[in-house]
Image (cartoon, coloured by chain):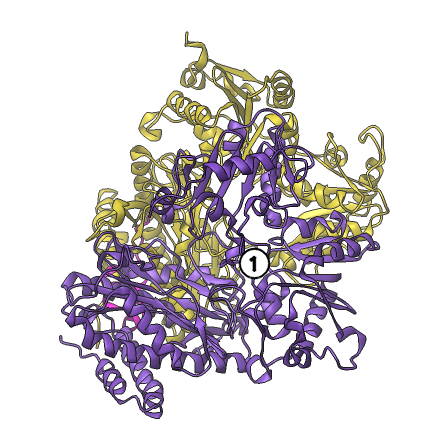
Chain colours: A purple, B yellow
């Protein structure tokens, strides 16, 4: 990797920062955040503005350019990468280190008195705007919205915003029609006494209308906004995709409908002016509901007194609780995914000893097997295919410079998943194709004990996921070990592989309580820098639990694994397992045999079936 | 209990709410919070203003009186008590129920437009003021500070503010001189670039100066404030207690000292004017550090730009980490406390079958045995002595109307503790003096498993206590049971039995990480309304843990029980214990035998010693 030369780019950016064509008055600093206008985790190439101006392409980072300086804030995952990708014009601000100033403090230290700091109000979330604006104001500066994006102004070969065809999902996939979702949303709006709801997150638009797209890699979403009134529905979307007769039929665009279900299709770019018109016409008590992660531009369109901002939207919360059709779809997707992985691991077992399989080849082979399955759409994230020391890099993605050959001497970690039309998968297995050391087995077994502790946990209705995080760590903690990431995240249903509002993490996180129908990952790990990484990840469904008693009639919950891929028994030190854990493993493998075995049989994949049967032999206790 | 008749009182309060002698302009509502000017949990009789105006004497509740209404907000612990104690002038607002309005919403619903809502700015914490003020302002009303307390204005027989003699603690108790504490505080102030620190919590003043008092029942504190500058120390305290030569010597009031350690003693009531003088004289960059729980009156004395507010003060954090002298003192106090409880339980075992021991008699007997121990000062909280169904009332305190006789047919729960000059204790034991049912034993054993899970937990340095809360519940959750309180609280060293900034709870709580030297309680429970209550509580010390590995060199922590009182083995269903738990109980009892046995022997308490030896026989596994 050689750094991107940014001298000329920065010169041009500093010019437009003073150019009245772009800014009402000159700005002394310009902030370039990572995100797009929808606060997406994964973004389209046209939204990679921070990477364009700096060369740094990691998933998290904020660039700030002043007349004299250019600085990049990013976290520990990316210190090395950012240092490699950026030239000497840039100062790397290592977040999390004690002496690294916050963006606000740094700005205050370098700016002349009474400076203006510009930012694209469409890119910055409202909560961040508020924090930054307050800090700057208290130091005598001003955060100002710059309507025209100054990176776009100098990005001459900026790629087009994607505008790919849509996929419609019928009731057999979604369980609920978009009409009924609108009805439910309006009832939530009535409860909170709001008249309008603005849908800004791409997965929320997709979920609400039972549509999917492919504008962003890995996430089956499309660029759109929606504004739902008590009697109106406006969908802001570009391109000729609304000409597709299947989409028109799905949205009933050409039918005679009650007016409150008639969808008005408007250009994507007209959201701001439409919201401003709504804002201008509000009468007292007519509130507008927005996420406090919505862009500041949209929030600002509504007069302060009329805004109703919440951390989670009613769509985010409804989307997280999967109905029976979605759950069945997720089950089917996970069965297909398991078939693909049985094929892959069987293949690896034969090929690895030959020394010809690299991390990239293995990742591609995984994709090949998945793509043979029905209704496969794409991967759900960049495959983490890592062996030996690369396994200890938690967010590793193999590239030619780091690509390592799998061998019988090293642990192999594969964290991968796919989008199928009926569901989204995300699974991690850690394998050894030779003979693992006692220490490797010991660590693997602690991780497995943590995985089981969460998966088999029984907890009262209303429990928040963050209260389960320590269960996953307890066995590691007992030996002085730990892992520095959360234990689980919400998973979408043929939607984003990471979604709110629930999760399992030790971090301060305002998660909503777990409830039956929610789907999360369970993925403890252990990483030893320079030698290996271990992670065991299943996607699990929250289900009601039968208990002996029922305190205050609250009812209890537990998890059912949707992922049904063998956990390599060769890596388990059986003597470290309790009887309960030992039973869990055997019952899990029995279920893999039954469910995935039947599907392998049906698909005529006999070699993979034999591999599955071998890998799911019951654990034997030697005592 | 007959309700307090408040008609006349409310009439007089409503008069002063309009009387220009007391208010600059009439207030349409007046808020009477629970607390004192120091946000103390336990308050002196002169500060029981809410109880005076309403009759409701519970520990938590806020009264609001308007021209037409009088309403009381309190939580589920007190619904019954409040309903009994208040007359028909009052509306009970049951907090936590779905339809109960918040104080702000209720005020907005009943007040005429543009109302003034009064509150004593010395009583309301700054963070609460901000929240309430913002909510009222957005509805067109104003929260206004009423300098003269309107309850005091009508409380003709209000008791005097206590002003009892002080106790000085030498280095053998405190480990650190007050001078060194001031030096450490000033270094924290320098780190944060603040010039002044205002000490408002009573236990923080007491800790800082190595003084104790008895102005408030159960808490060895005294009414005082302190303001620490980089070169000055001001102590605001009333009465002739500063005439005591022992106190003068301790504080070196008559010595020739470097000016920065010279304590200026000032009247308690002059804190506000002194702070205002400091506030008026500040130059840019001279910040003043206050807790955001400090009263609004004090915070308001400092111009906004100069305030530095934090949730926890540096004293709160330093006080939580006990040094070797404090830890040793706590150990000694717990040994004496265990001796008293061995005497008590031995006595109960003999007396209960006679049917003559009531909850109140048992509580008094516990106090009698404690008071025989050296350096006993007082109880550390009101003894919870409860049998049968009373045990299910978590904050029960026996009164003649509820007083129940202990019997061989019911479970007895005793949660009690004392202040000794060398430490503070808090211990709960649940006993059966006859034959417990299988179900009672089952529930007891789940609670014990939870207690052990926390007590024996090993966790990395830097872990926050709230991450351990679920360990205490896991065994109960597995059977569909739970308890509706937190698992542990910080414990002071001859100071308040509840102190921040650490704890073990599932509630949203911004706790500081646990570190070696912190002392918390470990007290899971199970309560069955109408039949029994179970709780097992030890006070435990955070200590470094030896582990097989040491991830990232972070080091690990665990707990050491300071409480050494037998856990009734008769109540344990041994077959529900794992081997690890079984060993824990036997080792714990072995330590009780050794440490408490030796002390009982030394004190010549042979009968209690025999009781201890009987109660600490090793558990036998029948399998």
Q: Within the image, what quadrant is residue B118 found in?
A: top right
A145 shown above or below B313: below
A176 shown above or below A128: below
Report the side of B20 relative to A316 (left or right). right
> In this orientation, does residue A429 appear?
no
Report the side of B17 relative to A482 (left or right). right
B264 shown above or below A211: above
Quadrant the C terminus of chain B occupies: bottom left
Report the side of B60 relative to A264 (left or right). left
Relative depth, front residue between B423 and B306: B306
Q: Residue at 73% of width from left, 36% of height from top?
A: B155
Look at the image and say whether residue A230 sits in the magenta stretch. no
Q: Residue at 55% of width from left, 78% of height from top?
A: A323
Residue beneath disc 1 = A160
Q: Which residues are magenta?
A: B563-584
SS for dot 1:
loop
Q: Position of residue A354 (x, y in %)?
A: 15, 72
Q: Position of residue B85 (x, y in %)?
A: 69, 54
Q: How many marks?
A: 1
Q: Position of residue B597 (x, y in %)?
A: 23, 49
Report the side of B8 relative to B220 (left or right). right
Relative depth, front residue between B563 and A49: A49
The chain ID associated with circle 1 is A
> In this orientation, does residue A449 appear?
yes
Q: Residues within 10 Å of mark 1 (few under 14, many from 20)?
A: few
The furthest residue to the top: B256
Quadrant the N terminus of chain B occupies: bottom right
Look at the image and say whether residue B573 sits in the magenta stretch. yes
Q: Within the image, what quadrant is residue A471 found in?
A: bottom left
């Amino acid at each position: 990797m050689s750094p991107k030369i940014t001298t000329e780019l920065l010169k041009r950016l500093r010019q437009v920062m003073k150019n009245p064509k772009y800014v009402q008055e000159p700005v002394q600093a310009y902030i370039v955040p990572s995100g797009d206008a929808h606060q997406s985790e994964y973004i389209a190439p046209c939204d990679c503005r921070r990477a364009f101006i700096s060369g740094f392409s990691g998933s998290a980072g904020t660039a700030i350019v002043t007349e004299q300086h250019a600085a990049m804030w990013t976290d520990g995952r990316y210190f090395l990468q950012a240092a490699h990708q950026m030239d000497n014009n840039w100062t790397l601000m290592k977040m999390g280190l004690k002496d690294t100033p916050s963006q606000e403090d740094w700005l205050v230290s370098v700016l002349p008195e009474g400076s203006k700091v510009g930012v694209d109000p469409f890119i910055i979330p409202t909560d961040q705007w508020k924090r930054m604006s307050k800090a700057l104001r208290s130091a005598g500066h001003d955060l100002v919205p710059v309507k025209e994006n100054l990176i776009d102004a100098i990005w001459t070969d900026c790629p087009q915003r994607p505008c790919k065809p849509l996929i419609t999902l019928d009731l057999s996939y979604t369980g609920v029609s978009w009409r009924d979702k609108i009805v439910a949303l309006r009832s939530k709006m009535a409860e909170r006494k709001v008249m309008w709801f603005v849908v800004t997150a791409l997965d929320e638009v997709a979920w609400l209308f039972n549509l999917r797209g492919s504008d962003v890699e890995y996430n089956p979403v499309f660029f759109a906004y929606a504004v739902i009134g008590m009697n109106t529905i406006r969908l802001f979307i570009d391109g000729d995709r609304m000409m597709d007769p299947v989409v028109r039929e799905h949205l009933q665009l050409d039918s005679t409908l009650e007016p409150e279900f008639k969808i008005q299709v408007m250009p994507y770019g007209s959201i701001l002016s439409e919201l401003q018109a709504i804002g201008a016409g509000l009468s007292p008590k007519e509130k507008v509901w927005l996420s406090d992660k919505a862009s500041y531009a949209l929030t600002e369109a509504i007069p302060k007194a009329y805004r109703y901002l919440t951390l989670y939207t009613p769509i985010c919360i409804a989307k997280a609780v999967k109905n029976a059709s979605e759950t069945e779809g997720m089950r089917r997707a996970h069965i297909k995914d398991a078939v693909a992985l049985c094929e892959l691991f069987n293949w690896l077992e034969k090929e690895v000893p030959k020394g010809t399989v690299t991390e990239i080849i293995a990742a591609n082979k995984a994709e090949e097997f998945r793509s043979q399955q029905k209704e496969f759409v794409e991967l759900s994230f960049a495959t983490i295919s890592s062996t030996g020391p690369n396994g200890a890099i938690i967010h590793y993605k193999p590239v030619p410079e780091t690509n390592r050959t799998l061998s019988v001497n090293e642990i192999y970690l594969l964290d991968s998943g796919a989008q199928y039309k009926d569901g989204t998968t995300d699974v991690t297995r850690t394998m050894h194709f030779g003979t693992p050391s006692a220490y490797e087995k010991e660590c693997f077994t602690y991780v497995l004990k943590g995985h089981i502790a969460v998966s088999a946990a029984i907890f009262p209705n209303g429990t928040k996921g963050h209260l389960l995080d320590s269960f996953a760590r307890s066995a590691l903690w007992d030996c002085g070990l730990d892992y520095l990431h959360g234990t689980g995240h919400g998973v979408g249903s043929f939607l984003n592989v990471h979604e709110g509002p629930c999760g399992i993490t030790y971090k301060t996180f305002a998660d909503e309580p777990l409830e039956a129908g929610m789907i999360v990952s369970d993925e403890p790990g252990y990483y030893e820098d320079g030698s290996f990484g271990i992670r065991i990840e299943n996607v699990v469904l929250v289900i009601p639990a039968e208990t002996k008693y029922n305190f205050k009639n609250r009812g209890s919950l537990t998890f059912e694994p949707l992922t049904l891929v063998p956990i390599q028994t060769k890596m388990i030190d059986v003597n470290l397992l309790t009887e309960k854990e030992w039973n869990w493993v055997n019952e899990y493998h029995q279920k893999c045999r039954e469910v995935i075995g039947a599907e392998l049989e049906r698909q005529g994949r006999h070699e993979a079936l034999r591999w599955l049967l071998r890998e799911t032999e019951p654990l034997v206790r030697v005592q």
